[in-house]
Amino acid sequence: MSKLDKSRDFGFDTRQVHAGARPDPNTGARAVPIFQTTSFVFEDSESAASYFDLKEYGNTYSRIMNPTVAAFEERIASLEGGCGAVGFASGIAAQAAALFTMLDPGDHVVSSTAIYGGTINQFKHQFHKMSVEVSWVDPDNLDAWRQAIQDNTKLFYGETIGNPTSNVLDIEAIAVLAHEHDIPLMIDNTFASPYLCRPIEWGADIVVHSATKFIGGHGTSIGGVVVDSGEFNWSNGKFPVIAEPSPAYHGLAFHDTFGMYGYLMKLRSETLRDLGAAMSPLNAFLFLQGMETLSIRMDRHVANAKAVAEYLDQHDLVSKVMYPSLEGSKYNVLANKYLPKGAGAVFTFDLEGGRQAGQDFISGLTLWSHLANVGDTKSLVIHPASTTHRQLSDEELVAAGIGQGTIRLSVGIEQIDDLIWDLDQGFLELQSKDNK
Ligand SMILES: *Cc1c(COP(=O)(O)O)cnc(C)c1O
């Protein structure tokens, strides 16, 4: 926003269009150009050396930073209220890098059970290989979080709106507990987007996103991002990996040298450098386009989701609807606190008839696409027990709150009466098979 940004605190709707972007000084291009280049010419040998010493901040190689990706990072940091952000090739890469940067072998994480199935796999299997163990807790039970804390606990982890059961996390209470024990709280805010909830305002230290979902918003690109509040004290004695001189960067002490930017600098200049899951400039460009309409899309997603949830709640063949904004939901109070504009557009409902009913219902739909994604303008549907959560055992399914007849919806921005008409077709198909 160049000259403008000093004179006024711009609102969310303005920042989602302008933050991180300025007309290109060389060409005057108004849209952020796609800087499709691997590398950048140094002005002279001195500035080349100081970039590599991290004494000056400058582009070297697009695995580590790129101007199109930087515009994306600045915009999402602005929308989440963070001090900065680092983009990644996927949401799963972003959270892996976020944990990897702060943890050592032998460290311990406390995580909500109600999270994305892919995250459960990553924590259980990949982090286990790095000797990081995870304790799983019922996200609604604050005592369970407290009792899970050990001397080597270095992180609390949860989702604003849990996937797929739509638990709304009591972020403020969990952040207070974490901070009493000098532990940072990391929140996956994918299902809410920064328009519906900004976890940093409630005390979260780090926010991660799968940008693949509502941020991109159109189902075109895989990407992820880590946003840091800049508030956590990494020099509290628990995080030598960030506070002490780093052998991976000729003895640089990241927190001492960069203060509030220490964690992000290490995330970029060591973890991203060494693990390499960089966001592509083209995807960053598509995410920038997506963010320009985030609030407008989310308002429509939420309005449609509420209407679909109310319709399903009245339906004879539906036993339960897990949408936190419904009056009867046990998360209604938390939803009103953390998600006053609405609890997103991804939720599940249970069919009376179990697994076969789930598959029959989906086969009757034509407008809703049957696939494994959420947060698209197009309405999406899936049967978790036979797809996304197929690798989980029966007990793990129960713990994750998924039944044999559970259907997950991601409600798009189409015309609402068309969406409900198509759901009616699904129920007709189910009834014609008569397996109630
Ligand atoms: C999709 C998703 C992820 C993983 O993101 P990818 O971009 O698919 O790697 C992580 N968390 C949540 C809540 C998600 O929905």
Image (cartoon, rainbow, N blue to C red):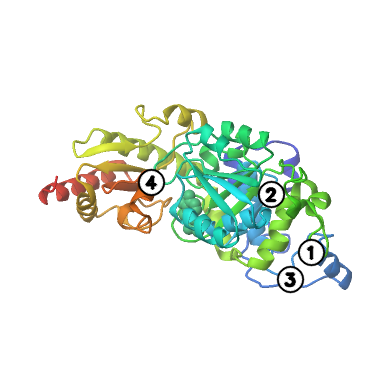
Specify the label residue 247 is tagged with. Answer: 1
Residue type (three-letter) at the residue carrying disc 4: Ile
Question: Which x, y percent locates residue 131?
Answer: 60, 59
Residue type (three-letter) at the residue carrying disc 1: Pro
Q: Which of the two discs, 1 and 2, sits closer to the camera?
A: 1
Q: Is 388 drawn above or below residue 16 in the view shown?
A: below
Residue type (three-letter) at the residue carrying disc 2: Gly
Of callouts 2 and 4, the N-terminal one: 2
Determine crowd level at label 4: few under 14, some 14-19, many 20+ residues with C-alpha closer than 10 A: many
What distance separates the C-alpha of mark 1 from that of mark 3?
A: 27 Å
Q: Which of the two discs, 1 and 3, sits closer to the camera?
A: 1
In the rendered structure, the answer to whether residue 360 lies left or right of residue 348 reads left
What distance separates the C-alpha of mark 2 from that of mark 4?
A: 30 Å
Q: Quadrant of the C terminus?
A: top left
Q: Which of the two discs, 3 and 2, sits closer to the camera?
A: 2
Of callouts 1 and 4, the N-terminal one: 1
Q: Which residue is mark 4?
A: 413
Q: Are marks 3 and 2 in contact (CB under 8 Å)?
A: no
Of callouts 1 and 2, the N-terminal one: 2
Q: Are marks 2 and 4 in contact (CB under 8 Å)?
A: no
Question: Which x, y percent locates residue 159?
Answer: 51, 43
Q: Is 97 drawn above or below residue 42 in the view shown?
A: above
Q: Nearer the viewer, residue 348 or 397?
A: 397
Of callouts 1 and 3, the N-terminal one: 3
> Please, what secondary structure does the residue beneath circle 2 have?
strand
Of callouts 3 and 2, the N-terminal one: 3
> Please, what secondary structure does the residue beneath circle 4 have?
loop
What distance separates the C-alpha of mark 1 from that of mark 4?
A: 50 Å
What distance separates the C-alpha of mark 3 from that of mark 2?
A: 22 Å
Specify the label residue 84 is tagged with. Answer: 2
Which residue is located at x 58 percent, y 45 percent?
A: 16
Specify the label residue 40 is tagged with. Answer: 3
